[in-house]
Amino acid sequence: SFERRDADWHRECNSQAAWSEEVNEVFHATVTREDGGFTITFGGLNGVSFAESEADVPQRAHDLLASIFAMHIGEDDDLPRPSGGGDLPVRLDALTVAKIGLRLAMREEGTSGRALAARLGIAETALRRLLDLDHQSHIRQVEAALAALGRTLVADVSEAA
């Protein structure tokens, strides 16, 4: 019925809006100078990274945050939320956010990697690279995978934090 489809659509939109807000939040890393480098953590989140130089800190902080999100998705946990503390603002890049969205869409649809690869006409290894947060995929490939799951990628530009 129309009412049921409408309710499903609203639930899906609210679910997508909720995760979209969470992955687009600014997190604040705590950076501690130690002998030989810097230790990077996010208050309330499990994970730690190290940087040898101050110049490496922002990239290491981003990679740590992406890894924390990947761990939560892989374990079917709620997405992390920013907590207080920390002096280095960190936001996930657009490609990482798109890949997280793809992983969540697959989970919500109950679609396996094998099934999505077949829909896209690509090898499973290519899909694994597409889902790998460390692999520099083309955003159009992620958009195609999202479209195969009935999703679309929406970009937003805002002032830097």
Image (cartoon, rainbow, N blue to C red):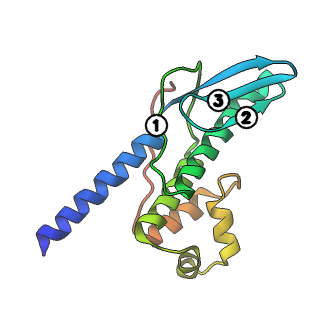
Whether pointer 2 and pointer 3 mark residues with C-beta atoms closer than 8 Å, the reply is: yes
Are the residues tagged 2 and 1 within 8 Å (C-beta)? no
Residue 160 lies, in percent from the top left, at 51, 26
User: Counting residues from the N terminus, which is met first, the one under dot 1 or under dot 3?
Assistant: 3
The residue tagged 1 is: 81
Q: Are marks 1 and 3 in contact (CB under 8 Å)?
A: no
The residue type indicated by label 1 comes to Arg
Tell me residue 153's x, y (percent): 45, 55
Query: Callout 2: helix, strand or loop?
Result: strand
> Which residue position holds label 3?
41
Residue type highlighted by circle 2: Ser
Q: Earlier in the sequence, mark 2 or mark 1?
A: 2
Q: Position of residue 42 (x, y in %)?
A: 59, 30
Q: Residue at x 64, y 29 (%)?
A: 41
| Cα gap from disc 2 to disc 3, whole angstroms | 7 Å
In the displayed structure image, the side of residue 74 where residue 155 appears, left or right: left
Residue at mark 2: 49
Q: Quadrant of residue 120?
A: bottom right
